[in-house]
Amino acid sequence: MDFFTSVKTCLLDKYTSFEGRASRPEFWWFMLFCVLVQAVGQGIFRHWLMSILSLALLVPSFAVGARRLHDTGRSGWFQLVGLIPLIGWAIEIYWMALPGSPDANAWGAPVADVQPVQAPGQY
C-alpha cells in the first residue's frame, strides 16, 4: 500500500471503521500524513482552523490504530496504554511496528503488507 492509497483508505473508505485489520504500511503512511498535515497547518492556518483540522483527523487516527492493533491480535482498546506516563507511547509504538499475525484472528483475515510485483512486460 502506498501513501495515497493509505490516506484514501483511512479518510474516505474507513473513516470511522473500527472493525477489521490494517497493515503496517496503511497505518504508518496515514500517521505520516497526519504529522505532515499538522506541521504544514501550524505554519499556514490560524489556531481555530488548525483545531478543527486536528479534530477531523482524530477519529480516523483512532480507527486505523484500532485496526492496526487488531492485525497484531490485540483489542483496539489497547490504544489506552499510550496514556501511561513515560512508557505508554513506547509500548504502543512497539505494538504498531510488529508484523500482523499471518493467520485469521477474531478481527478477520490477514491483510497483505505488500502487493505482488509483476515482471517487466507482464500485465
Image (cartoon, grey):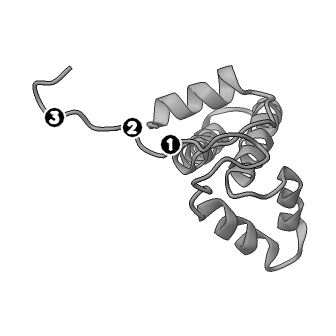
Write the residue at 61% across / 38% down.
37
* Distance between the alpha carbons at the discs numbered 3 and 1: 19 Å
Tell whether 63 sits left or right of 38.
right
Residue 123: mark: none
Task: Tell me whether the residue at label 3 lies in contact with that at label 1, contact meaning CB atoms closer than 8 angstroms.
Answer: no
Task: Kindly identify the residue that appears in the image at 62 percent across and 52 percent down.
Answer: 103
Marks 1/2 in contact by CB < 8 Å: the verdict is yes
In this view, the residue in front, 20 or 7, is: 20
Give 89 or 56, whichever is nearer the viewer: 89
Q: Distance between the residues labelled 2 and 3?
A: 13 Å
- The amino acid type, in three-letter code, at marker 3 is Ala
Q: Name the residue under label 2.
A: 115
- Relative side of 123 to 99, left or right: left
Q: Quadrant of residue 67?
A: top right
97 is higher (above) or lower (below) than 52:
below
Is residue 63 or residue 117 the one in the foreground?
Answer: 117
Under mark 1, the amino acid is: Ala
Residue 41 x, y percent position in the rendering: 64, 37
Q: What residue type is labelled 2?
A: Gln
The residue pinned by badge 3 equals: 119
What residue lies at 56% left-to-right and 60% top-to-bottom? Answer: 99
Q: In this view, does 109 lie above or below 80?
A: above
Q: Is mark 2 on a helix, strand or loop?
A: loop
Q: Mark 1 points at which residue?
A: 112
